[in-house]
Image: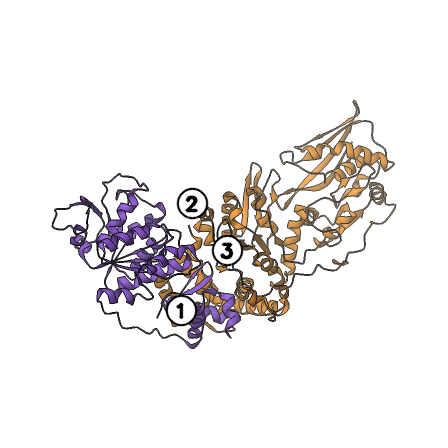
Amino acid sequence: MLARAVTHALVGLDARRVEVEAHLQNGLPGLAIVGLADRACQEAKHRVRSGIASAQLEWPSRRITVNLAPAGLRKEGSGFDLPIALAILAASGQFPLERLAGHAAIGELGLDGRIRPVRGVLAAAEGARHAGFGRIVCAAESAGEAALAGVDPVAGRHLAEVVSYFRGEIDAPSVEPSANGSGPEEDDLDLADVRGQDRARRALELAATGGHNLLFAGPPGTGKSMLARRLPGILPPLTPEEALEVTRIYSVAGLLSPGRPLVRRRPFRMPHQSASVAAVVGGGPGPRPGEATLAHHGVLFLDELAEFQRPALEALRQPLEDGFVGIARAEGRAVFPARFQLVAAMNMCPCGGRGDPATECACSAQKLAAFREKLSRALLDRFDLVVAVPRPRAVELSGREVEESRPVRARVVAARERIRAGPLSRSPGATELLDRAVERLPLSGRGRARVARVAKTIAALAESDAVTEEHVAEGLAYRSPRELSA
Amino acid sequence: MIELGRADDRFPPRLRAIFDPPRALYVRGAGELELLGRRAVAVVGARSCSPYGAQVARMVGRELAAVGLVVVSGLARGVDGEAHRGALDVGGLTVAVLGCGIDREYPASNAQLSRRIEEKGLVVSEYEPGVGPAPWRFPARNRIIAGLSEAVVVVEARERSGALITADFALEEGREVLAVPGEITSSLSSGTNALLKLGAAPLTATADVLDLLGIDPPAALDATVSEAAAQVLALVRDSACGADELTARSVLDAGALSVALTELELAGLVAATDGVYRAVTTR
């Protein structure tokens, strides 16, 4: 007696079809799972057995072999519990096995037979749709996610409920389609909270408009991180396609908030300085997405840039260049999208005294050199905008009016439209100024190209038809200063 | 590399005239040997100088080299290095005197600078190649810096600084000594201010050196800057400050201020260190 259920295994962000075959035969009663199942997957035995018993269903006292095909693909995680249980129940004739046709299944079983959500349901549901399945059996909590893929979820709370459905006793259990945001959307932090820092604010607006990577350098406590956190709030909202992409990533990472399947906010990721290479770009046997991928279509913020391990920083160079991370594994290559905007903050020296008029830098020349050594030229070259944020004197903080995020975002969105509409020409005066700057200032050829890019953004924000001298002159103010390079 | 014995005709006469001239000079670089005999001014000071000191050193180096003087210094970090860089900024001539063999790269952080100096200028030492740097060699090196120069400018020096030793040698040999006045509360100016008290000439503009040497200062080329830039320059001259403070004190917004500051930087009137803008000329 053989029955077959279909589920999907995750390889990176992609779902691969996996057939779960259950075969009953005479012999010593027992259950064997074959087909490169990892530990969590092997433990399915115990959950499935208890779950079936708790659902008042019969555990067949036969020799049961479960095969996860293709047998060469590594399977990990607990999402196979539900399809294994369904295959066993169908094989033992507890519901008609032809009813399984057109259904995919994914979910973890509790010992009481409850169906629990797992990560990656969106990707699995998309896989199911591509494979021509119209319905996917999953936990009630995952139903919203599955529905995003255009597949009808069969949202089971309990195994017994799902079996009743397959017996034809009840209709497909469904959950109220969540309005995505039954709870209030978290408020974005507002720029109005930041006083002073006019230049840094201006740079933030430019970064939002041109998608430039941005580096703040200055002593501690000058509001560098405060500003960086407010970047998502002035970026245009995610397009529907972008939102789906981000949701897929968050689903695979298991980071979706319950009750709000679709991610609408631009991601803002802030890994700690101790992050490893795998944590930053992704990895592990799975492999799982790293911070660079979690920041896809959003902002990756590295606070205390110079405190990160150098390999972790260097690993960011590929995604910064190509917009994706490729991770090679024996079973193949996983490709994670990673098109993020990098914002970083750092002190100007290890003690933090530089750029602070109130203190003197107490760093030895060696310490300073080691600090600067940490940041390769190649990495610094990725920052179009570098802003030194010296400690403000008290005068500046006194009650000048500060702008809120909303009008800034409106300007950003309008300027982005203009950039999309067509390339801007550059006036001869602007080109001449660029050449003069290379001659007079410490500015490399690459630096010149960065300034030219930023000047275009400035021109677009100024609603100008061409890049003029003035735009280039402002762009030059955000070049990487001599002091930061080793 | 050339070894120049004391008896050699090409040995710089000013150096030969000091109380204990070196037995020989080892010379490296593409510059003419005759360079060592030209009119020269030494610019020396603290290794761990302030941003102010660094900018003054660079300005003085630049303006001295611009009128054709050779800038002599010790290739150390801080003031020395900035003085060399200033001279190189205007394509001028500069001589570095080392306290170790000229084949040594010391300090390593100035190796690049040393190569740039050699393109047109010279690197010299009284020590044979291979001799390593040692603390007691530097005071002796300072007598050569003073010996090669007609005047010594001390930019920033603590109370017991090597730069003061250079000044002492210069005084003993009857060369001019100038000191850049500094804040009386800063330990980095205690040495220079002490020199002033003892009667050294204060340097408040590069023209002060040129006066002492009887050189006509170049006609002040009044860089014409826009009205906004002129306003910002006036603010920066009041006190060094960050961009945001300038925005607060001027009528410009952040973008327009950046435009003005870039204009001033390109005109060589203002320079930025660690986000703090400073006027770099006294004119």
- Residue at 56% across / 58% down in the picture? A222
Relative image position of residue B25 (x, y in whole percent): 20, 46
For residue A359, the mark is 3
Relative image position of residue A75 (x, y in whole percent): 66, 37
- Asked whether residue B22 appears in the rendered view, the answer is yes
Q: Nearer the viewer, mark 2 or mark 1?
A: 2
Q: Residue furthest front?
A: B198
Q: Label 3 is placed on what type of residue?
A: Thr
Relative image position of residue A379 (x, y in whole percent): 47, 51
- Asked whether residue B73 appears in the rendered view, the answer is no
Give the spatial CA distance, label 1 vs label 3: 27 Å
- Residue at 57% across / 67% down in the picture? A412
Q: Chain of mark 2?
A: A
- How many other residues sit within 10 Å of disc 3, few (<14), some (14-19) or many (≥20)? few
| Residue linked to disc 1 | B264
Which chain does the purple colour mark? B
Q: Chain of mark 3?
A: A
Which chain does the orange colour mark? A
Q: SS of the residue at dot 1?
A: helix
- Residue at 55% across / 56% down in the picture? A343
- How many other residues sit within 10 Å of disc 1, few (<14), some (14-19) or many (≥20)? many
Q: Chain of mark 1?
A: B
For residue A366, the mark is 2
Tell me if residue B253 comes above or below residue A252 in the rendering. below
Residue A112, quarter of picture? top right
Q: SS of the residue at dot 3?
A: loop
Tell me if residue B132 comes above or below residue B194 in the rendering. above
- Are the residues under badges 2 and 3 in a single subunit? yes
